[in-house]
Amino acid sequence: MSERLQKALARAGYGSRRKLETMISEGRVSVNGSIAVLGTKIEKEDIVIFDGQPVPPAMLFEHARLVIAYHKPEGEVCTRNDPEGRATIFDRLPKISQGRWIAVGRLDINTSGLILLTTDGELANRLMHPSSEIDREYLVRVHGDVTEEQLERLMDGVNLDDGSARFTDIVRHPEADPDRRNQWFYVALMEGRNREVRRLWESQGLQVNRLKRVRYGCIFLPSFLKQGHFVELGQKEVDDLGKLVELPSLPIPKMTPQESKDVRRRLSKKSAFRKPMRTAMKRTMSPRRPSDRGH
């Protein structure tokens, strides 16, 4: 059974389909000794070379999906290699025998919190694509006097340099003191544009001095997960992510003994990634205690 080259490479973890289409057009992939072109299809017996390195056939045709949640601290960047020599999130991740980790979106160097990483390029691409409308939730500390009129404008939409933007939800932290200059909020939005949360607040003359992502789609940042640590998602959580973007269920790949040792901890049947939610406007958000967690 043949399959499109970019689809097989995406599943193997070499990038999103769109990015791989560009790489194929640049002549970076060959099949059976010939430079591949867009539309090339492959079968299990074909020899695929990517950037001068052979791609194991099992990677191209194995239908499996691995996802981990990483708690990014401030000061780390989300690029695979940083020209300035700064620490990256990939420095702390477990080594895997097949494929590579693909980050589902990014957080800037001054933002902490949840980053999902997967070996499935198609899953990563769909979760990030604006058409999927996957919401992200953040815990944010804002410096300044925040009025109800400002919150309404942020919900209705404001014009930024790269177009209109808005929060789909804003919930004032239940323990916030309105008389203090620093206010805590939970906010949600459907996009992942560069510094979008910070720029939205700045459009109202307010400054964000702490920002932490606490949810991506249906996955919450587990309360037990310390900064700089990661945890593997269970089969149910991986399937739930796939359902968000209309992808079929795939098994979690079997790990080598070393990979299992690196991961250290698997989830029990009671998932730490799903928390009870309380009603707040149209969407819901789970309350947390920022004063207790040192955010």
Image (cartoon, helix red, strand yellow):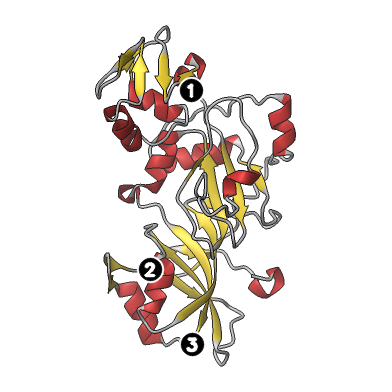
Q: Looking at this view, is 135 or 115 the one in front?
A: 115
Q: Spot the residue most to the bottom.
A: 179
Relative to 32, does residue 267 appear above or below in the rendering?
below
Asked if residue 103 lies left or right of residue 156, the reply is right
Q: Position of residue 18 (x, y in %)?
A: 31, 37
Distance between mark 2 and mark 1 Cα atoms: 36 Å
Viewer-side label of 3, 1: 3
Name the residue located 58 percent from the left edge and 56 percent from the top edge.
Answer: 76
Mark 1 surroundings within 10 Å by alpha-carbon count, few (fewer than 14), some (14 through 19), many (20 or more)? some
Q: CA distance from mark 3 to mark 1?
A: 50 Å
Numbered circle sitting on residue 250? none
Residue under pointer 1 = 63
Residue 224 seen from this side? yes
Instruction: Give the answer, above or below, for where 43 lies relative to 7.
Output: above
**Between disc 2 and disc 1, whose residue precedes?**
1
Q: Nearer the viewer, mark 3 or mark 2?
A: 3
Numbered disc 2: secondary structure: loop
| Badge number at residue 167 | 2
Rendering coords of residue 277 (x, y %): 55, 61
Tell which of 34 and 56 is nearer to you: 34
Q: Which mark is residue 144?
A: 3
Quadrant location, the N terminus: top left
Question: Residue 253's quadrant in the figure?
Answer: top right
Query: Is 209 placed above or below 5 here?
Result: below
Dot 2: few (<14), some (14–19), or many (≥20) neighbours within 10 Å? many
Residue type at the position of mark 3: Gly
Contact, mark 2 vs mark 1 (Cβ under 8 Å):
no
* Residue type of the residue flagged with mark 2: Phe
Query: Where residue 275 appears, x then y in whole percent?
Result: 60, 56
Could you tell whether 222 is left or right of 148 in the image? right
Residue 183 coordinates in the image, percent (x, y):
54, 82
> Upstream in the sequence, badge 3 or badge 1?
1
